[in-house]
């Protein structure tokens, strides 16, 4: 039985978060995120939408087997998180969700059906009575498989209250244990949404048999405020995503909800099981594997969240930190301590610092990361934790290197920017191309394109420095779209809510003290990611193709 003041944190980074354009993660990246979420202390991990594709099912199952059990990598876990899969209100989806989550100690199926007039009439073409009957049928079916069932009346924020009560009551009577109220389109305001939750409490017969959850989208920038208003009105589960990623403008951000509850405990009087000192780490990991950078002024985890620029503020901070700081950076794991190791430090000390930062590397990864640390230490006097994390994640969260950057030379200035690029191509041969571009990055990208030869459109290119100073590491993120991939029907990426589809976007990142090298690495990583996904897809198609 949970405490009345305990809020369950339901993380949907791997499901709704992954629906952000271009945020596609590989199965191993998803597993890494799930392990980190488990260490963070979230109560429920929505690991994906198993029916979306065979890959998605395997990814959810991998998390159920690897994180949802009582020992992870040989270390006992007292209480593993619940592992959940989304499923449309259809037997096929529910079966696949169950197949994926059943290995977990605490499996959950999350099924949903839209209830608002606009969805009923235009998307489902179902009457109210048909919607209610479907909820009863599918929740009963899911409950026959799994004891822990969450039901969401999709677009609850725009559903008539009387019909919402009926839908929720039907789900509870059929066996739902959690009722999630989604503001699917981010339309409501905090007072309105809080009031909806209070009314549900007062008017739904049997509501005490279920936990009320909320799932708010950020279309008006109100997702966190709406979630907090709901908690003040009796909701005890909140659905959030790391860095606030998710469909369109995203979901309520995990770190903002958790820290609002913690810092303003005096008002909310609610607690979570999250270890807030892990928040910066999970934010960086998610940013890295999704390729979605965190805006510098983002609350809690942005690079400037604890930076004091104005003289008056700095003066105040020196006198008493509380003048301009409502929480310490250490509370969210954002300390910027200098690495006490220099270019003469040994591998053991380096490995030790990484372990302290939460990256206990295996021998091969450690070897590669140490080589890069040494070469960085030759160029940069002070290496901060931020440098170290950029460097390690650049090593770890990269797709398979089908094409590898071997050498790069650029000449630029007011004349003709020229790049000579040498890549190791699959099979080990080295290939060199020189091109002239509008600038050095353009020239490098054209040269890489001439060797790899995959038609893509560059959608986004961004460069950031990891720390301050002229010798800082530069981090580059790019997103590309494959020009020759169909964008109409792509089953593996069907958006579970709309039933529609989307173009595939692939991201890549690179870090280096030379931003042109970082740019080349990022672009190549996006192309390698695209090629790996295409290879996996063709192999799978070959497996299922009928033999002639
Ligand atoms: O936004 C939404 O309505 C959802 C549901 C599937 C919970 O993501
Ligand atoms: Zn959603």
Image: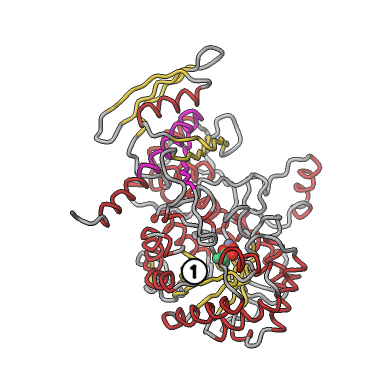
Nearest the eye: 258 or 14: 14
Residue 387 as seen in the image, left or right of residue 529: right
Quarter that holds the C terminus? bottom left
- Local SS, label 1: strand
Residue 240 in sight in this render: no
Quarter that holds the N terminus? bottom right
Neighbour tally class for label 1: few under 14, some 14-19, many 20 plus, Cα within 10 Å: many
Residue at the image point whose x is 42% and y is 56% from the top: 491
Q: Where, by quadrant of the figure, is residue 7 drawn?
A: bottom right
**Quarter of image, ligand 2:** bottom right
Nearest the eye: 97 or 118: 118
> Which residue, given by chain and number where applicable, does mark 1 sit on?
88
Q: Where is residue 252 in the image (x, y as percent from the top left)?
A: 63, 60
Residue 546 as seen in the image, left or right of residue 92: left
Residue 296 as seen in the image, left or right of residue 359: right
How is the protein colored in the picture? secondary structure
Q: Position of residue 280 (x, y in %)?
A: 57, 53
Nearest the eye: 11 or 365: 11
Residue 70 as seen in the image, left or right of residue 497: left
Residue at the image point whose x is 72% and y is 69% from the top: 193
* Image vertical order of residue 285 relative to residue 68, above or below: above
Query: Is residue 513 highlighted in magenta?
Result: yes
Query: Is residue 484 highlighted in magenta?
Result: no
Is ligand 1 closer than 8 angstroms to the Cβ of mark 1?
A: no
* Image vertical order of residue 309 relative to residue 193, above or below: above
Q: Position of residue 56 (x, y in %)?
A: 40, 60
Q: What stretch is highlighted in magenta?
A: 503-532
Residue at the image point whose x is 50% and y is 35% from the top: 458
- Furthest residue to the left? 548
Residue at the image point whose x is 70% and y is 79% from the top: 162
Q: Is the magenta stretch mostly helix, strand or loop?
A: helix
């Amino acid at each position: 039985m949970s405490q009345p003041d305990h809020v369950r944190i339901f993380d949907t980074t791997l499901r709704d978060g992954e629906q952000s354009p271009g945020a596609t993660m590989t199965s191993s990246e998803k597993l890494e995120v799930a392990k980190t979420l488990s260490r963070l202390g979230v109560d429920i991990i929505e690991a994906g939408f198993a029916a979306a594709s065979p890959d998605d099912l395997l990814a959810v199952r991998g998390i159920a087997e690897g994180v949802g059990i009582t020992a992870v990598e040989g270390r006992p876990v007292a209480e593993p998180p619940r592992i959940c899969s989304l499923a449309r209100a259809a037997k096929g989806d529910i079966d696949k969700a169950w197949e994926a989550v059943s290995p977990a100690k605490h499996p959950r199926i999350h099924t949903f059906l839209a209830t608002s007039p606009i969805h009923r009439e235009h998307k489902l073409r179902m009457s109210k009575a048909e919607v209610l009957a479907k909820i009863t049928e599918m929740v009963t079916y899911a409950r026959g498989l799994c004891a822990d069932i969450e039901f969401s009346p999709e677009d609850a924020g725009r559903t008539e209250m009387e019909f919402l009560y009926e839908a929720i009551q039907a789900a509870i009577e059929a066996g739902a244990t959690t009722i999630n109220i989604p503001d699917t389109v981010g339309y409501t305001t905090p007072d309105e949404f809080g009031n909806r939750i209070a009314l549900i409490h007062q008017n739904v017969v049997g509501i005490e048999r279920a936990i009320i959850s909320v799932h708010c989208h950020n279309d008006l920038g109100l997702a966190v405020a709406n979630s907090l208003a709901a908690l003040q009105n009796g909701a005890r589960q909140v659905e959030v995503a790391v860095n606030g990623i998710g469909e369109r403008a995203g979901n309520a951000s995990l770190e903002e909800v958790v820290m609002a509850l913690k810092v303003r405990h005096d008002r909310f009087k609610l607690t979570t099981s999250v270890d807030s000192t892990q928040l910066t780490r999970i934010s960086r990991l998610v940013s890295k594997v999704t390729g979605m950078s965190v805006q510098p002024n983002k609350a809690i985890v942005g690079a400037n969240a604890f930076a004091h620029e104005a003289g008056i503020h700095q003066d105040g901070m020196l006198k008493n930190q509380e003048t301009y700081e409502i929480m310490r950076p250490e509370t969210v794991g954002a300390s910027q301590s200098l690495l006490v190791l220099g270019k003469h430090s040994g591998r053991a000390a380096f490995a030790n610092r990484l372990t302290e930062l939460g990256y206990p590397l295996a021998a091969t990864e450690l070897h590669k990361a140490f080589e890069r640390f040494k070469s960085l230490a030759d160029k940069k006097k002070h290496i901060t934790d931020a440098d170290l994390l950029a460097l390690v994640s650049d090593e770890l969260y990269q797709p398979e290197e089908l094409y590898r950057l071997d050498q790069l030379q650029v000449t630029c200035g007011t004349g003709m920017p020229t790049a000579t690029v040498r890549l190791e191509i699959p099979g080990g041969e080295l290939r060199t191309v020189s091109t002239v571009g509008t600038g050095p990055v353009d020239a490098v990208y054209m040269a890489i394109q001439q060797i790899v030869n995959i038609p893509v459109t560059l959608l986004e290119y961004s460069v950031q420095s990891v720390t301050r100073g002229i010798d800082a590491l530069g981090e580059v993120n790019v997103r590309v779209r494959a020009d020759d991939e169909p964008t109409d029907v792509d089953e593996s990426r069907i958006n579970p809510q709309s039933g529609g589809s989307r173009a595939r976007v692939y991201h890549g990142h690179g870090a280096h003290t030379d931003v042109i090298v970082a740019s080349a690495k990022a672009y190549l990583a996006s192309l390698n990611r695209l090629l790996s996904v295409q290879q996996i897809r063709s192999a799978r198609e070959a497996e299922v193709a009928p033999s002639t």
